[in-house]
């Protein structure tokens, strides 16, 4: 059974600070890792994908992957009130015949305090 | 931009009715997915398809079926709706690109079964 674990929060961060979101996964053969942002009442929006160990930066967002520790994280620099949302971590295993569905964590609720 | 559309944002049905949820994507993606999202349970995969007329069961297929007659369209069918199928239903699509699986979501259908 594939599992993805996230702290549900809420995680409260002052505006302008760095928000750090963490995720662990159980399936060692997981190959693709994603962070989605979901505003209340809306659908998930893909914000970062990462496939190899190390860091990947995109604007204010940095995803970090450590496959040996089965750990993936998302850093949000210069946090803004508009970053307040639930952040979902998701992992995928490529089965060869066709892409597999994603396994999602239950999400971390992030609150940026003005 | 990838666009995934779903036929209804809100739907109210009665127990025992047959319910069709439609999803269309305009980016020529091979893969399409149906998830449901419930408070405390997160997103769970119901069914997916990696080609026309192909379907694969996800983690919670019971009570559901799917149809994919055209590449751009993937339908979720509730044969006899029950109150425990009240949920947010999310459709997603992705390219089949080696071990990449970036999934893009539609706006969701909030289904209430009375």
Image: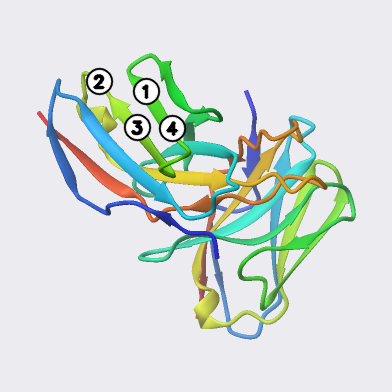
User: Which residue position holds label 3?
Assistant: A74
Kindly give the residue lying farthest to the front in the view shown: A68
- Dot 4: what SS? strand
Q: Are the two marked residues, 1 and 3, in contact with CB atoms closer than 8 angstroms? A: yes
User: Which residue lies at the image location 14% right of the left edge and 34% below the top edge?
Assistant: A13
Badge 2 local density, few (<14 within 10 Å), some, or many (20+)? Answer: some
Q: Are the two marked residues, 4 and 3, in contact with CB atoms closer than 8 angstroms? A: no
- Dot 2: what SS? loop
User: Which residue lies at the image location 42% right of the left edge and 16% below the top edge?
Assistant: A58
Q: CA distance from mark 2 to mark 1?
A: 8 Å
Q: Nearer the viewer, residue B68 or B50?
A: B50
Chain for mark 4? Answer: A
User: Which residue lies at the image location 64% right of the left edge and 32% below the top edge?
Assistant: B3
Q: Is residue B19 left or right of residue B66?
A: left
Q: Are the two marked residues, 2 and 1, in contact with CB atoms closer than 8 angstroms? A: yes
Residue A9 got which mark? none
- Dot 1: what SS? strand
User: Which residue position holds label 1?
Assistant: A62
């Amino acid at each position: 059974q594939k599992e993805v674990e996230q702290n549900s929060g809420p995680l409260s961060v002052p505006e302008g600070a760095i928000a750090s979101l963490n995720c662990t996964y159980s399936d060692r053969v997981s190959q693709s890792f994603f962070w989605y942002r979901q505003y209340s009442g809306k659908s998930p929006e893909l914000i970062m994908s990462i496939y190899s160990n190390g860091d990947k930066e995109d604007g204010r967002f940095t995803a970090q992957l450590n496959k040996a520790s089965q750990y993936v994280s998302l850093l949000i620099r210069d946090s803004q009130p508009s970053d307040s949302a639930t952040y979902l971590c998701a992992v995928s295993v490529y089965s060869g015949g066709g892409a597999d569905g994603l396994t999602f964590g239950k999400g971390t609720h992030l609150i940026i305090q003005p | 931009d990838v666009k995934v559309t779903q036929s209804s944002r809100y739907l109210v049905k009665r127990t025992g009715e047959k319910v069709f949820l439609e999803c269309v994507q305009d980016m020529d993606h091979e893969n399409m997915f149906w998830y449901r999202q419930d408070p405390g349970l997160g997103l769970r995969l119901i069914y997916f398809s990696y080609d026309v007329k192909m379907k694969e069961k996800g983690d919670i297929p019971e009570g559901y079926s799917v149809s994919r007659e055209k590449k751009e369209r993937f339908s979720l069918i509730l044969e006899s709706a029950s109150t425990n199928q009240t949920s947010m239903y999310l459709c997603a699509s992705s390219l089949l690109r080696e071990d990449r699986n970036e999934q893009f979501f539609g706006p969701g259908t909030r289904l209430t079964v009375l």
